[in-house]
Image (cartoon, rainbow, N blue to C red):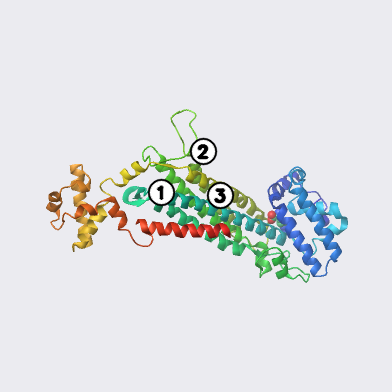
Amino acid sequence: MALWGGRFDGDTSDLFKALNDSLPFDCALVMEDIEGSIAWARALGRAKVLKAADVSKLVKALDSIAERESDPATAKISSATDEDVHSFVERELIALVGDLGKKLHTGRSRNDQVATDVRLWTASAIVNLRRLIALAIDALVSLADAELKKRTVLPGYTHLQRGQPVLFAHWCLAYVEMLRRDHERFGDALSRVCVSPLGSGALAGTAYPIDREALAADLGFLEASRNSLDAAGDRDFVFETLSTIALCGVHLSRLGEDLILYSSSEFGFIQMSDRVTSGSSLMPQKKNPDAAELLRGKSGRLIGNLVRIATTLKGLPLAYNKDLQEDKEPLFDSVAHLTLCLRIVPECVSGITINRDRMLAAADDGFSAATDLADYLVRAGVPFRDAHHTAGRLTRTALELRVPLHKLTLDQMRAIEPRIGPDIFKELSIDAVLAKRDVIGGTAIGQVRKQVGIAKASVKAMLRA
Ligand code: ARG
């Protein structure tokens, strides 16, 4: 039975039911709906709308529904045909306590109810995602720490052309930074999720003397919403969560792309573990980086889900409109898929085999110190623009002679720039090149070690919280 039959004579069509019903997906909110209903029953009790004994009966019945629904063996929701999760819970409640169950919805609307449920669900989803981000960071920091001790060097790229060498640990920490910002962004979003819309009624505010602050606190929210018209139709928090998820997904996509490139035969820097790769059904030699490819590929759906909610919200008149029912599936989908992606990151990262020699050979290809050659000339008093030009000419000469920069003889160098001295050669070693980047955020060993320490401490704090 629908919750709203009074003014209707005819039945709704089957087609309408197929279009309109949300139970097939909002069944995921059953625990939140019960939690919100318990808090509402208590709030009605405090407002003297319900007697204390009735409140206890309602709470007990709602608890028993929660217990039954938490076990798939006893849950009824999967075979129910109610319009939505709210109708299901209310019908089950009435089945347990009779007419008293019909009193629960006093002063409440499904509009403030569903907004509350989705907020409760989103808050706990964000708490879980933040934990998974912390674990992904933890795996990256451990890899950074281990490879720092081995002084593993990676060619750094711009435009996917070799640029300057960096420590492999520095590369790990670049992704740590992205994920750290995601962790922070989710925390920030959470403070806006944890606002209670309950008591906003359908749109104008409930007509009963509900202490909305106490109700908000009862639900674990930080405050009560300040405008009923806004609160009943506000899905900014879904938009913000999906946007934060999409950005985190973009970061994982870039991580995936680096792993794919570095594990290709062309690069040959790393090998992904058997646990996260697959073979080809045709080509027996293949080891495909599927997990990394899906880290990259899933970002498409995460961005798509953000566009879904943005498009749904755009142009909606105040306050609640049924369009808002479309908020749930993108939200659930994005949370589920980002969860999977984040969970696979530690497995991908900790299982990497690193081909240090090949990485070093690529980093030390004889040209990645070209910037340092220019810097050497700057120290000899040459303006940087001219030094850059000279280093470029020396590079061209070396390329023509098919030797690395440091294999040019001093005479060959001096023919182009007489201010070059014999001390140039130690400038061009990879160790010297790395050691010079000794600024905050630079790739010198000491700086990276410091950043590993900072990252370790912050991940510890994240996991403690
Ligand atoms: N299933 C609905 C949703 O997800 C619940 C709210 C229904 N509100 C209403 N006024 N019909 O949005």
Assign a secondary structure to mark 2: helix
Residue annotated with mark 3: 338
Distance CA(mark 2)–CA(mark 3): 19 Å
Distance CA(mark 1)–CA(mark 2): 21 Å
Query: Which corner quadrant holds the C terminus?
Result: bottom right
Q: How many marks?
A: 3
- The residue under the point 40% across, 57% down is 449
* Mark toward the start of the polypeptide (2 vs 3): 2
Q: Is residue 357 visible?
A: yes
Asked if residue 452 is positioned above or below residue 406 in the image, the reply reads below
What kind of residue is marked 2?
Arg
Asked if residue 294 is positioned above or below residue 193 in the image, the reply reads above
Marks 3 and 1: CB-CB under 8 Å?
no
Dot 3: few (<14), some (14–19), or many (≥20) neighbours within 10 Å?
many
Residue annotated with mark 2: 275
Residue annotated with mark 1: 147
* Mark toward the start of the polypeptide (1 vs 2): 1
* Mark toward the start of the polypeptide (3 vs 1): 1
